[in-house]
Structure formats: C-alpha cells, structure tokens
Amino acid sequence: MAGYFFEEVHEIEPIVSKGSEGKVTQGYAIKKGSHGAGQESWVARNTTLILGCHPEGSSKEIEPSAAEWTFSIDTRLISNIDGAVVIVCCDRIQGGLHSEKMGALVHVKVNDCEVDLIGLREIPTGHTDYFHRVTNQEIPDVRQIKHCGTKYSFRVPVDFLNSRSDVNIGQEKVSLVIDKETRWDIDYVVLVVNHTRKKVRSWVIAVIFTIFGAVAGVMSTEVWNFVGRLIK
C-alpha cells in the first residue's frame, strides 16, 4: 500500500579524497614536498600522490607498494545502500597506472575485500610502458574529477561495505596495492555510494495542495462573512 503513495528514487553520494591524503602502508610514494631531484613536475599539484615511486629513483623501488584512504559514510544512508563505485583519477591524460614490467599485478580492495585484480599486459598507443587504460566506463558526474584525464572505475558489492569489525559503522577503507616496478599517479580517490530513498509521489502532493487550497478558501470565505456580520 505504501508503494502507492511513495516512489523509490536512486541517488549517489560521492565522497572525495585527494590522492595526496592517502596513507602509505608499504613501499614508497612521492607527493609535493617529498619528491626527489628531477621529480618536481610529476607532483606539481597538491593533490598528487605517485604510489610506487621512490624519491631516490627507480633503482630503489625493490618491493611492492600500498596506500589506503578512509571514507566516512553518513550513517543515515547505510540501510539504503545498493552498492558503491570506487573511482581513481589522475589529472593528466598521460598519468595513471603503469609499469615497465609485463604482467605486473595490482589489487584494488575495499575493507580488505578484493574488488579487482589488474594485470598490466598491453602498451596502448601513445605510451612506452604497460598502461592500464579502460574505455566505456560508467563514471558518475562528480565535480572534482570532471576534467581529469585518466579515470578508473571499480564496482563495489554492497556486502563489502561495513564489513570491518575494528572500526565504527560507516568507516570504509579503500586500498591500492601494486607490484614492484609499478607506479600509479593518483590525484583523487572517490567512493561513490549508491542508495535509494522514498519520495512522496507528485500526484499525492498535488492532492494535498488541492485539499489545502479548498479548505483555505472555505475558511477565508467564512472569515469574511463573520467580519461582514460584525460591521453591519
């Protein structure tokens, strides 16, 4: 019966973090202010983190690297979440996930649950190394990443969310783990939460306003009649 008066509206809630806000948990990364000689142009933006890049050069990059970002979901949305999407972006079109090693592996995780496993096996046109390039992705319209040159999107099952017992409800962790000899230029990491809410149908609102208007009209007429009797 409630469905007769209400309709479900599907909405998204994007939560945006800068790449440079990531916590490096293994290996190496550089950002503005922590880069090495000759790396200034790679991290000219305050948003940039290059995961897997050692400030002293590639000869020092001898182990895998990992970083994580924590997102807080409004607890009022949790019971209505349908799923989520993780978007990892680089402002530059030539930046992104790449490696000189064929077959390098990359893990994308949410709350330590494997969302995607990427193997770098192709050198796209315009690149000199193995580069992850995905086309025809469904990228939600998020203001901060609208003009980013490289965007990767990963779908997150709803049961991966709120799956950690060691943190408060609504605290979600996105982790990126890359092989050695691999780098990922990151300007933004976005957790886009898909949820539904109930909305009163438009015809119900129209009926309510019609009834209210009719009642208000009757009351107005009665008031004027009463005032008219008083002044006679």
Image (cartoon, rainbow, N blue to C red):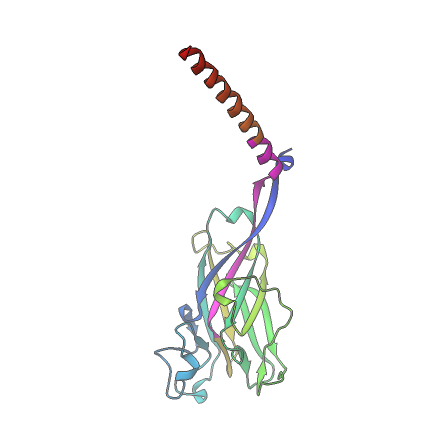
Residue displayed at 60% across by 31% down: 207
Q: Is residue 227 visible?
A: yes
Asked whether, in this view, residue 55 is left or right of residue 194, the answer is left
**Which quarter of the image is occupied by the C terminus?**
top left
Residue 37 lies in quadrant: bottom left
Residue displayed at 62% across by 42% down: 7
> Front-most of 53 and 201?
201
Q: x, y (%) of residue 160?
A: 55, 57
Magenta-colored stretch includes residue 195: yes
Residue 230 lies in quadrant: top left
Looking at the rendering, the stretch of residues picked out in magenta corresponds to: 186-209
Residue displayed at 59% across by 58% down: 157
> Front-most of 5 and 110?
5
Q: Is residue 54 visible?
A: no
Q: x, y (%) of residue 20?
A: 41, 71
**Which quarter of the image is occupied by the N terminus?**
top right
Asked whether, in this view, residue 207 is left or right of residue 190, the answer is right
> Front-most of 20 and 107?
20
Q: Above or below — where is 71 with respect to 129?
A: above
Q: How many marks?
A: 0
Asked whether, in this view, residue 118 is left or right of residue 164, the answer is right
Q: x, y (%) of residue 80?
A: 55, 47
Magenta-colored stretch includes residue 90: no
> Front-most of 80 and 54?
80
Q: x, y (%) of residue 140?
A: 57, 61
Q: Residue furthest left?
A: 33
Q: Above or below — where is 148 with respect to 59?
A: above
Q: Above or below — where is 192 with respect to 67?
A: above
